[in-house]
Image (cartoon, rainbow, N blue to C red):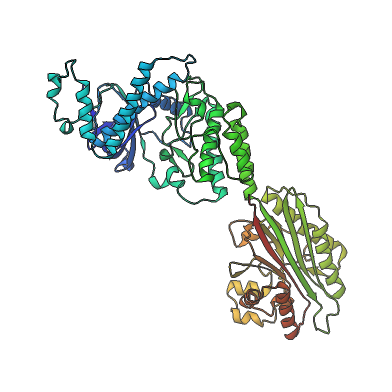
Amino acid sequence: MQLVTIQTGKTITLDNIEVEIIKYLGVLNNQIHYYQVKVVKAEKLTLNQSLGLLRIGDIESNLSHEIKLRNQLNNYGMISDLWANITLENVIINLSNPEENYFLNLYSDLKVKENSLLTNSQNLEIIDNQEDENKEEKDDELTKDFIINEKDNHHHELKKKKIEDNYLKEDGKIEDDYLEEEYYPEIEVTNQESSTKLLILTPYPPEKNTLTHWLTQSHSDEEKLSLLVILCQGFFYLSQNGWYSLNLSPDYISIETPIKLYDLTCIYPQEIVLNTGLLGNYCPPELSYSKEINQFMSSYVIGSLMYQMFHNNQLPNTQNLTFNLIPRIYQILQISLSPIPEERYSLNQLLQILIETRNALRHKTISWQILKKSILGLSQKRLVNEDSYGIKEQEINQNNIVIAGIADGMGGMVDGELASKLAIQTLLKTPIDFDLNSQESQQKWLIEIFNQANKNINQQVKDGGTTLSVILGINNQLMISHVGDSRIYLITNGEIKQLSEDHSLVNMMLASGQITEEESINHPDRNVLIKSLGSKSVLTSGYVQDLSKNNDKISLILENNDLLILCTDGVWDYFTNQQFLDIFNQENNLDLAINKIITQVLNEGASDNATILVLKCSIESYKF
């Protein structure tokens, strides 16, 4: 049978994938060897030159658990792809690099000592054996000296001394067999602990995407909690399928969409009972001795990572933990990291609390500064103000809702005034009964207001009609509905945008190219409307404009200090968009800005009624 040697620089083939072993990464999770490899040749061409993670362990190692878990969950999104999975009988792990051997031997020596100590911790009988204690002290001193001398670059001499001691005869002479290996530092060292091995090949996580790298970067509290929520969701899903994560390998967790787990050897089936203790940076303390596993251990793992995120340090190995005084975070950590497993959250409880805490951070406190002004104008023909406006604010289940509308009546003094009033009254009197979580429901509610206002005007006004422009703000989400030539503007990030379109004859001619922008300014049909409420018995589909007219969506998200401006043509007729923008940019005081606009309208002659509403959106994020 062919012998397979695993060492840096060699090329091996796994399930028709030829890989070159680039780098030895160490021994983790119960004597599993980790390597970085590069795909040299594969049937799937996209894999060529890709980096891979090769792990090699005994057939009873945690790798066997991983294969069982992968088979059970099949294509679960949080688990990385599996490129190859084979069992080979004649495998030699050859660590020809002295540094690699040093870490392997050091790990093995310390692991044996650790397992011995962990096993002894279960024994309730105190054994008074001075000779064993002295031997253990000597072993500790030898291990300590070994590590120190290795760090001082004297490892070859010390290894030689240890080997000589092991081969001394009773008379103090060295056995002849050992003399043949007196050039030990120059001899290639191999590890042949077990020839039958399980080999797993997966993609290699991009280093800048790993959780290890992510933890070195600065993140908002919301980003931290969002990541914890995703991991906790994954752990909860695993628990529902009979598996518990008892530790984390941040080097092999990739922060992408979705998060990917490349190494599953920290995840154990629930029926397993650990025969020896398990230690790790994120392990619960009760795993330091053999124990049945449960979901409270996984909650501790999440808590350990949460501690690291909010303290910029890994969880210290101490029973007297102290936490930063951060409301909510403090309580979650205290319960999740309780030394008594049954006092911790279940995974489902922890998941719900993390979601609630994250959502609290996402909740924005919205407030509106609202100013308005309406004037009759200076025309001798207009002795009644046919403009109407209305504003309503309400809070429903901690959701801030603002509704504002403006209407410009037409058809004569009495009819125009009545038509605009009916439109605004319909808007303000309609109960808010839409679904707060459905934009379609909200848009349908707005359209129904326009239909009802149109019906009321047709029933009560003989020869009049009105424009109607409405904004609906739900927290920082904005929707509009609009008919006519009143306007809705948004000033955001130093720019002004007209959200409504003019339903006028001149604007239609301009859009079709029949006239130029300059010709449209003083066109004789400038005030002729092609859409208004009261001009049709029934509004057809699409008659009312929403934001999807010029955008892909029917809503947009407002930012802090955004300004919404609603005005009739008696105002905007005297200003370009840039002039509007300049006035509001120059005046921090909105009262002064509005007064400046109205003053200019009067100075220009104010031939029409003039009405303007300004709503300033202030957004404050929740803070712990």
Q: Residue at x 58, y 34 (%)?
A: 336
**Between residues 3 and 40, which one lies in front from this camera angle?**
3
| Residue that appears at 87% across and 64% down | 460
Q: Residue at the location (83% across, 61% down)?
A: 425
Which residue appears at 63% of the width and 33% of the height?
A: 349
Could you say which is closer to the camera, residue 371 or residue 217?
217
**Left or right: 258 with respect to 208?**
right
Where is residue 475? Give x, y as percent.
Answer: 68, 55
Q: Is residue 250 above or below residue 582?
A: above
Quadrant for the N terminus in the image: top left
Residue 353 percent location from the top left of the image: 63, 38
Q: Position of residue 506 (x, y in %)?
A: 66, 75
Residue sitting at the far front? 130
Query: Residue 109: x percent and y percent?
Result: 32, 26
Is residue 602 at least partly visible in the picture? yes
Numbered marks: total: 0
Question: Looking at the picture, does residue 423 appear above or below residue 105?
Answer: below
Kindly indicate the quadrant of the structure image that contains residue 131: top left
Residue 179 or 250: which is nearer the viewer? 179
Answer with the quarter of the image where residue 603 lies.
bottom right
Horizontal side, residue 121 vs residue 397: left or right: left
Q: Judge whether residue 85 can be spotted in this image.
A: no
283 over 483 or under it: above or below: above
In the image: residue 449, left or right of residue 518:
right
